[in-house]
């Protein structure tokens, strides 16, 4: 009976999806494609309901059913997460969560198989429909991990989750990804430094919309970080934040400036101001002098005032150092300009462009007789 049920599920559900035809020029990098609704869904829905009842039934002994709900069955079930139909993915999410909870012996395989899906998505494929659903399942899985975390679980964070920041479509699943990552940090706060270094590794350079999302996730991670981990990564972190402060995209600059409104972060900045203020002050000064957006100028002045109230002597020292550096830079530019002018004057005349004499007669063409 059990064998027949599982065979019926496999025959009706497991199938190869048709090739996807997608337009790369019109699809947004942070929005999902228009959903496709499978015309055979009403048939599939009945099968999924039966599968869910089978998995959750108290009469199904997982030790016996594991013979049929094996790694091959689970692997093919995971392949269905690439379905274009959001209704099917939603059913799969529930079924996978129930299987993970009931069939404890299959948990390591499920984690490994999902990791492989993430690896292929990051390294080979340019699209996968079910990343957000898989992350949603694993959000609850991670929350159930026992402390201290096993090395296998940490590897899942380092090797599978953090690289998911690389694809250009990260905005589709970023809320679920952020939740998974914050669950890890809540379990083991020391992982916050690793996560921040991963964010800096995959930080977008040319995509302003993605950069704003990274700043939002960064703030959530910094809410959970302790002082020891913060001090380990604060120098590269605030160099990146300083670059964001000077972004010509006003929303990126504004989002970076709003980090100072976070009380926990501001407290850590205050305690480490001797290191952080000299890093970010030049960016604030350039904003105050050169940024085109009035809102960014206003927030910049507010942040400068925060630093002034925090440590007036340090701010005046940074201001003096910035002015000295600007004078050195201007002097170096002037020296380069004078050097090039001198080189142009002293250049060999043979390399100068030939100039035609206005009084010179045109060359005489001999007459052929």
Image (spheres, rainbow, N blue to C red):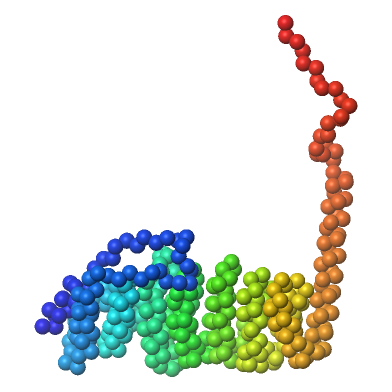
Asked if residue 325 shows in the view, the reply is yes
Q: Is residue 314 left or right of residue 48?
A: right
Q: Nearer the viewer, residue 117 or 30?
A: 30
Identify the residue shown where x is 75% and y is 92%: 310
Residue lying farthest to the left in this orientation: 1
When asked about the image quadrant of residue 123, the answer is: bottom left
Residue 232, placed above or below residue 335: below
When asked about the image quadrant of residue 248, the answer is: bottom right
When asked about the image quadrant of residue 272, the answer is: bottom right
Identify the residue shown where x is 86% and y is 30%: 357
Where residue 119 appears, x then y in whole percent?
41, 71
Where residue 287 appears, x then y in whole percent?
73, 75
Residue 28, placed above or below residue 186: above
Identify the residue shown where x is 53% and y is 90%: 189
Identify the residue shown where x is 67% and y is 76%: 245
Where residue 208 appears, x then y in whole percent?
58, 71
Q: Is residue 205 left or right of residue 270?
A: left
Where residue 257 appears, x then y in whole percent?
66, 81
Q: Nearer the viewer, residue 16 or 72?
A: 16
* The N terminus: image quadrant: bottom left
Q: How many marks?
A: 0
Asked if residue 79 shows in the view, the reply is no
* The C terminus: image quadrant: top right
Residue lying farthest to the top in this orientation: 369
Residue lying farthest to the front in this orientation: 294
Residue 167, placed above or below residue 255: above
Q: Is residue 310 left or right of residue 163?
A: right
């Amino acid at each position: 009976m059990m064998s027949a049920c599982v065979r019926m599920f496999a025959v009706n559900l497991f199938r190869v999806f048709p090739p996807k035809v997608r337009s790369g020029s019109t699809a947004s990098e942070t929005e999902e494609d228009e959903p496709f609704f499978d015309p055979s869904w009403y048939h599939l829905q009945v099968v999924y309901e039966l599968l869910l009842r089978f998995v959750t039934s108290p009469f199904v002994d997982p030790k016996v059913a594991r013979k049929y709900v094996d790694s091959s069955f689970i692997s093919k079930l995971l392949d269905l997460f690439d379905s274009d139909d959001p209704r099917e993915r939603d059913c799969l999410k529930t079924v996978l969560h129930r299987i993970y909870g009931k069939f404890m012996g299959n948990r390591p395989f499920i984690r490994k198989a999902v990791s492989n899906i993430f690896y292929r998505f990051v390294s080979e494929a340019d699209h996968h429909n079910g990343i957000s659903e898989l992350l949603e399942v694993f959000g609850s899985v991670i929350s159930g991990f026992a402390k201290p975390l096993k090395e296998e679980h940490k590897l899942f964070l380092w090797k599978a989750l953090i690289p998911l920041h690389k694809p250009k479509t990260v905005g589709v699943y970023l809320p679920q990804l952020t939740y998974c990552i914050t669950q890890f940090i809540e379990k083991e706060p020391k992982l916050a430094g690793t996560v921040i270094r991963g964010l800096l590794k995959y930080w977008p350079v040319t995509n302003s919309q993605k950069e704003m999302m990274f700043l939002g996730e960064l703030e959530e991670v910094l809410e959970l970080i302790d002082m020891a981990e913060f001090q380990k990564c604060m120098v590269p972190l605030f160099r990146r934040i300083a670059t964001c402060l000077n972004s010509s995209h006003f929303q990126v600059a504004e989002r970076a400036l709003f980090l100072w409104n976070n009380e926990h972060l501001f407290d850590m900045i205050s305690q480490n101001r001797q290191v952080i203020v000299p890093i970010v002050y030049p960016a604030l000064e350039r904003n105050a002098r050169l940024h085109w957006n009035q809102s960014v100028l206003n927030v910049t002045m507010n942040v400068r005032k925060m630093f002034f109230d925090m440590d007036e002597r340090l701010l005046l020292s940074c201001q003096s150092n910035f002015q000295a550096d600007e004078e050195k830079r201007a002097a170096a530019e002037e020296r380069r300009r004078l050097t090039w002018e001198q080189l142009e004057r002293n250049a060999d005349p043979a390399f100068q462009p030939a100039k035609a004499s206005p009084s010179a007669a045109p060359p005489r063409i001999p007459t052929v007789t």
